[in-house]
Each structure stands twice: as C-alpha cells, then as structure tokens.
Image: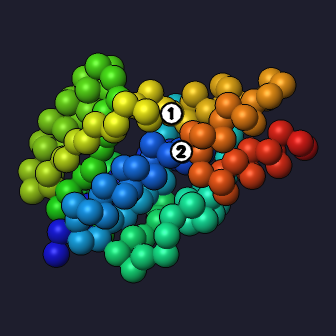
Amino acid sequence: MRTAVYAGSFDPPTNGHLWMIQQGLELFDHLYVAIGSNPSKTYTFSVEDRMEMLKQSLPSCERLTVSYFDNRYLVDYAKEVNAQYILRGIRSPGDYEYERVMRHINGDMAPDITTTILMPPRDIAELSSSMIKGLTGPDGWESIIQRYVPDPVMQRLIKQTDQ
C-alpha cells in the first residue's frame, strides 16, 4: 500500500490545498493531510478550526486522514504513520529552492521516504494562505476571495471578520 503525507499549516485551507489533496488521492492508496506546527508562524485559526475546515471541505473518504503533528520533523511523522512518500507542492522558484533543500535533508534523515513534488495549474499557482489572509477585510473582499477557498473556509472567514 502506497501511503503519503501532505503537510502544511492550512491557515486557512485554499483551493490550492484541495487540488494537492485530490492529486494525492489519485497517486496514493492512503493520504494523511497533516497540519503541522511551525514555531516561526503566527496562526489566524486554531488547529481545531483548521482541522474542521479541512474536514468540511473534503469529501468523506476512507483513504484520507486529516491529522495534526507538533514538535516533530515531518519525516518522523511520516515514519509514525508508515508513509513511504511525502507530497509537496511548488508554486514559484522560491518554493522550488526550499523544497529542493528539504527533500535532501529529509532524504538524509529518512532515505526510505520519497518526496513527490507537484506543480499546480496556472489558475491556482500563486494561491497561498498568506495571500488569502492579506486580501481579507477591505470592502468587497468576499467577492475576490470566494474563488480561492472552499465554501466552509469562506463561511469561517466571513464569521471571523464579522466579530
């Protein structure tokens, strides 16, 4: 059985994340979508909120697990869930450089885990959670953002800005 981990902060989940998850389900027998904690980031949504948004945005599928890991290297989490693959996405040259370095470091730490890198289609290539957060708030923001996030995330963003 081919098992992969697709990890990120998902703060908030975007249509780009959903595209990666869909591709992961086509490539692997089981996919763990793992919310990781990065101590250098400040989060807008709690882990519980991010897990709920992901679960509401994804189809129910026995081959998909949404989980969380903290204070561990991604390869250690992958080993824990018996994953042979790490799924990553690149949107830009900066992403490529970062992922290239991480692929080699992860390979040093866990040579039996293969990193698989995908490039999203043009219409979502520049999409990021940071971009979504940066566009939220000014008059009319809803009509701009609704094309970039699934409906459960849109509803959570609207609720958050109304508070």
Of residues 93 and 48, the one nearer the viewer is 93
Q: Secondary structure at mark 2?
A: loop
Q: Which residue corresponds to the image point at 29% horizontal and 19% vertical from the top-left?
A: 93
Kindly check if marks 2 and 1 are in contact, taking CB atoms under 8 A apart as contact.
yes
Mark earlier in primary sequence (2, 1): 2
Q: Position of residue 15 (x, y in %)?
A: 50, 46
Badge 2 is on which residue?
14
Q: Position of residue 95 (x, y in %)?
A: 32, 27
Badge 1 is on which residue?
128
Q: Left or right: 14 with respect to 153?
A: left
Of residues 87 and 37, the one nearer the viewer is 87
Q: Left or right: 57 with respect to 74?
A: right
Q: Left or right: 148 with respect to 144?
A: left
Q: Secondary structure at mark 1?
A: loop
Q: Left or right: 38 with respect to 92?
A: right
Question: Relative to 46, does residue 103 appear above or below in the rendering?
Answer: above
